[in-house]
Image (spheres, coloured by chain):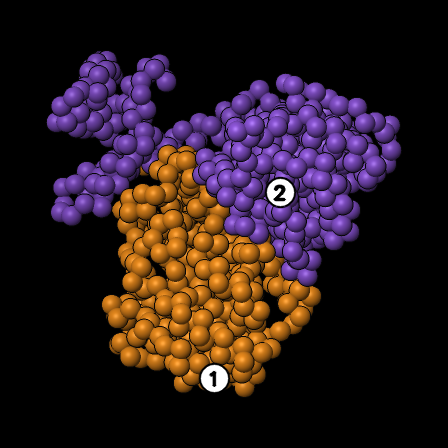
């Protein structure tokens, strides 16, 4: 087997401090630019750190400009990788144990970092041998998270991107008149530049009907429509009970921060739904794919994730306006009621 | 003797890597890998040979993609070969980094931000790269540098951090950017980013530059004379901006506008009010001119806008797209923030107004500094009358739009 450089030639990090931290390497040459996967990974990293009695997570996000994406994301190229990279950076700062975020674009620096960590025997994710294999499973399952929850009775929760929590409260009070927020994300991959799994897209007329019905019944509610600028129809802007952060120049970090203070999230299975899943807010995630069930440790038809509360609901069929209204009636206000586990 | 044989084999194999026959190419690559695995060559170069004379197989994108393909292949042989190659790549890569750390004086810089990241901090990114870095010990080296940014461990109100990151990713000389909350993470990571010389110095002094505070003479010089280059024009950003121009303001001469912002990054309402009257007046005099504001506007300030005014960030363009827009609009009007400085660096004609209220160290002037035929007026005052006069000069000098005028 090929030998690797002797660790004596590699400057050692300050071991006592590093021994309390998990080094997480997100290498986009084989890992995915995908909101849901990256957010799930953040929770998983926190569970690993907790179980190893570590205090922090240091995230290293590596993109090699010459090979900026996994082979199945071939639309990410040396010419546009900065945009994709920029779009996901805020996700790392939702990690509740984050101590540092290192954005690396130099292969030599990254390899040196990984190998020195491996040689030092300090905690690292993924395991060195798995990193060498350049494989990431898809979809990311919940096995580790379910097991952690079974052992400890809780999951570490995603926070607003670091530094954005105060902004969201100010913005909510000052610009959104402190109206109760319900975040919605009816998935519309068909409207993006790289449509994928469009069968998971939401039927928008159903959602418009729902939003308009709530406007009559609960006029104080403000729907916050999150997602890329291209992912909503212009008709959404016609509604006075809808706020679209991207239409006001805000970005993913702002959206996630607003989600964190929302009363409720409702949406299709997507990256935002993943954030809701792990962010300790009430949610209704509709039309989950049946084939995802075993990855989540569930059976199609289960109403909650194994770690979900009573006000954290998933469904397994295409939504209707009536069903969305029923879910809204059931879950809205559950924060005030202090809903517990099912 | 073995080294000479290896050198000979390597030279033959290198030539065969470009052979039209796939089998010959693969055999050549296997020979090179075998030589390297045996330790007789180093990273595609024979041991003891002249470094850099031979193509660096291991860092070539097609080779790396091939390694990944082999690693992810089914079966046993290909993943095993891929694993061997991956370890070789890693070994070579680490050796190269180790040499770099040992031989370089300046690879990285440590910044801290004393207070919140604001518009001035963002602007200072480009000033630092184009003027402070240029005059540092790293100036002889056109290579990129690494930045270690230290924020307070208790910093919980920093809603412009991602704008700083977005801008930093576009700067030509910044390669790696590491952000640390508190000292511990920085100290742990320092051996990865700092050369041996820097590391010794760092552990002695813990010196870090405050990104909010650039040397006053430097900022004054920039406010007088502007800057040049340093910001990447992203290809996909350029495309989105051109799409935006054609859809939102077809046929117009387009002037980008940058205004002073509040602490959360939305445009300052008073500043917006002052500039709107200036822009309306200019548009009334020049019907083919439209303005695109690069800052975002708070919802409470939003209203119906005249046809000659658009807000790029509200129409799907990101911070990075807006930086691209500043580089390719026909002109610029506004403050010398990160947008203004980027426009200035791209030699855009324009009116450039100080971002901060100066202390009068250099006398007011309304003269122009012409570069490549483009009118760039660097104002030393924020007085509306001076701005209006300068804007008129710049807009009058912009090329006339001709679309729709073919028929006379």
Q: Quadrant of residue A70?
A: top left
Please name the residue that numbered disc 2 is placed on: B292
Asked which secondary structure carries label 2, the reply is strand
Whether residues under marks 2 and 1 lie with C-beta atoms below 8 angstroms apart, the answer is no
Please name the residue that numbered disc 1 is placed on: A329
- The quadrant of the picture occupied by the C terminus of chain B is top right
Circle 1 marks a residue in which chain? Answer: A
Q: Are marks 2 and 1 on the same chain?
A: no
Is residue A134 toward the left or the right of residue A155 in the image?
left
Q: Is residue A53 visible?
A: no
Q: What is the C-alpha distance between the residues marked 2 and 1? A: 43 Å
Q: Is residue A216 visible?
A: yes
Q: Which numbered marker is on residue A126?
A: none
Asked which secondary structure carries label 1, the reply is helix
- The quadrant of the picture occupied by the N terminus of chain B is top left
Instruction: Give the colour of chain B.
Output: purple
**Which residue is found at the position 64% from the left and 67% from the top?**
A176
Estimate the x, y position of residue A256 in percent, counting from the top left.
52, 62
The number of callouts visible is: 2
Q: Quadrant of residue A42?
A: bottom left
**Which residue is found at the position 44% from the left and 65% from the top?**
A185
Depth check, mark 2 against mark 1: the one in front is: 2
Task: Look at the picture and state if B406 lies above or below A137.
Answer: above
Is residue B378 toward the left or the right of residue A2 in the image?
right
Estimate the x, y position of residue A112 in percent, counting from the top left.
41, 38
Instruction: Give the colour of chain A.
Output: orange
**Which residue is found at the position 21% from the left and 41% from the top?**
B70
**Which residue is found at the position 39% from the left and 55% from the top?**
A191
Task: Look at the picture and state if B175 lies above or below A192.
Answer: above
Question: Are there few (<14), some (14-19), or many (20+) residues within 10 Å of tag 1?
Answer: few
């Amino acid at each position: 087997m090929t030998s690797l450089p002797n660790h004596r030639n590699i400057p050692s990090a300050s071991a006592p401090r590093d021994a309390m931290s998990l080094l997480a390497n997100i290498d986009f040459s084989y890992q995915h630019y995908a909101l849901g996967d990256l957010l799930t990974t953040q929770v998983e990293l926190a569970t690993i750190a907790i179980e190893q009695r570590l205090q922090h997570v240091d995230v290293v996000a590596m993109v090699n400009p010459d090979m900026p994406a996994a082979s199945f994301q071939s639309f990410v190229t040396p010419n546009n990788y900065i945009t994709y990279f920029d779009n996901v950076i805020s996700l790392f700062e939702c990690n509740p144990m984050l101590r540092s975020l290192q954005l690396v674009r130099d292969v030599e620096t990254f390899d040196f970092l990984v190998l020195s960590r491996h040689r030092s025997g300090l905690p690292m994710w993924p395991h060195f041998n798995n990193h060498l294999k350049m494989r990431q499973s898809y979809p990311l399952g919940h096995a580790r998270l379910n097991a952690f929850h079974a052992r400890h009775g809780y999951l570490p929760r995603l926070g607003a991107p670091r530094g954005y929590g105060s902004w969201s409260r100010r913005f909510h009070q000052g610009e959104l008149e402190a109206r109760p927020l319900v975040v919605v994300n009816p998935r519309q991959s068909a409207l993006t530049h790289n449509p994928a799994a469009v069968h998971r897209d939401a039927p928008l007329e159903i959602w418009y009907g729902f939003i308009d019905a709530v406007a009559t019944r609960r006029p104080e509610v403000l729907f916050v429509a999150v997602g890329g600028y291209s992912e909503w129809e212009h008709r959404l802007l016609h509604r006075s009970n809808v706020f679209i952060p991207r239409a006001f120049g805000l970005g993913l970090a702002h959206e996630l921060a607003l989600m964190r203070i929302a009363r409720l999230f409702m949406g299709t299975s997507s990256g935002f739904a993943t954030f809701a899943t792990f962010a300790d807010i009430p949610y209704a995630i509709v039309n989950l794919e049946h084939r995802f069930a075993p990855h989540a440790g569930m059976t199609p038809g289960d109403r909650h994730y194994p770690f979900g509360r009573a006000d954290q609901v998933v469904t397994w069929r295409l939504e209707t306006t009536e069903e969305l209204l029923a879910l809204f009636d059931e879950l809205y206000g559950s924060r005030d009621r202090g809903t517990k586990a099912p | 003797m073995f080294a000479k044989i290896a050198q000979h084999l390597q030279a033959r194999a290198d030539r065969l890597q470009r052979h039209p026959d796939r089998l010959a190419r693969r055999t050549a690559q296997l020979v090179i890998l075998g030589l390297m695995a045996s330790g007789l060559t180093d990273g595609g170069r024979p041991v003891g040979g002249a470094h850099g004379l031979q193509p660096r197989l291991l860092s070539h994108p097609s080779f790396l993609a091939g390694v990944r393909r082999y690693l992810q292949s089914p079966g046993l042989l290909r993943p095993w070969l891929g694993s061997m190659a991956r370890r070789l790549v890693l070994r070579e890569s680490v050796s190269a980094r180790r040499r770099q750390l040992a031989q370089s004086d300046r690879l990285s810089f440590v910044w801290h931000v004393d207070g919140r990241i604001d518009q001035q901090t963002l602007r200072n990114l480009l000033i630092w790269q184009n003027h402070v870095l240029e005059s540092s010990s790293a100036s002889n080296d056109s290579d990129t540098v690494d930045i270690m940014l230290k924020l307070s461990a208790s910093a919980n109100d920093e809603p412009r951090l991602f704008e700083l990151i977005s801008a930093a990713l576009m700067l030509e000389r910044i390669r790696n950017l590491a952000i640390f909350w508190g000292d511990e993470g920085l100290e742990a990571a320092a051996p990865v980013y700092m050369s041996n010389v820097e590391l010794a110095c760092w552990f002695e002094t813990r010196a870090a530059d405050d990104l909010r505070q650039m040397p006053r003479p430097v900022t004054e010089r920039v406010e007088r004379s502007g800057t040049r280059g340093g910001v990447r024009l992203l290809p996909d950003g350029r495309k989105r901006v051109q799409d935006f121009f054609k859809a939102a303001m077809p046929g117009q001469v387009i002037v980008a506008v940058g205004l002073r912002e509040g602490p959360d990054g939305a445009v300052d309402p008073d500043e917006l009010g002052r500039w709107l009257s200036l822009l309306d007046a200019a548009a009334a005099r020049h019907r083919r001119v439209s303005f695109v504001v690069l800052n975002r506007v708070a919802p409470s300030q939003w209203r119906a806008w005249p046809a000659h005014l658009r807000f790029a960030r509200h129409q799907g363009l990101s911070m990075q797209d807006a930086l691209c827009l500043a580089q390719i609009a026909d002109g610029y009007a506004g403050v010398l923030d990160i947008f203004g400085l980027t426009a200035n660096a791209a030699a855009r004609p324009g009116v450039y107004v100080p971002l901060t209220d100066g202390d009068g160290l250099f006398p007011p002037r309304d003269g122009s500094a012409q570069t490549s035929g483009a009118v760039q007026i660097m104002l030393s005052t924020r007085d509306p009358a001076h701005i209006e006069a300068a804007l008129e000069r710049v807009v009058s000098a912009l090329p006339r739009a001709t679309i729709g005028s073919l028929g006379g």
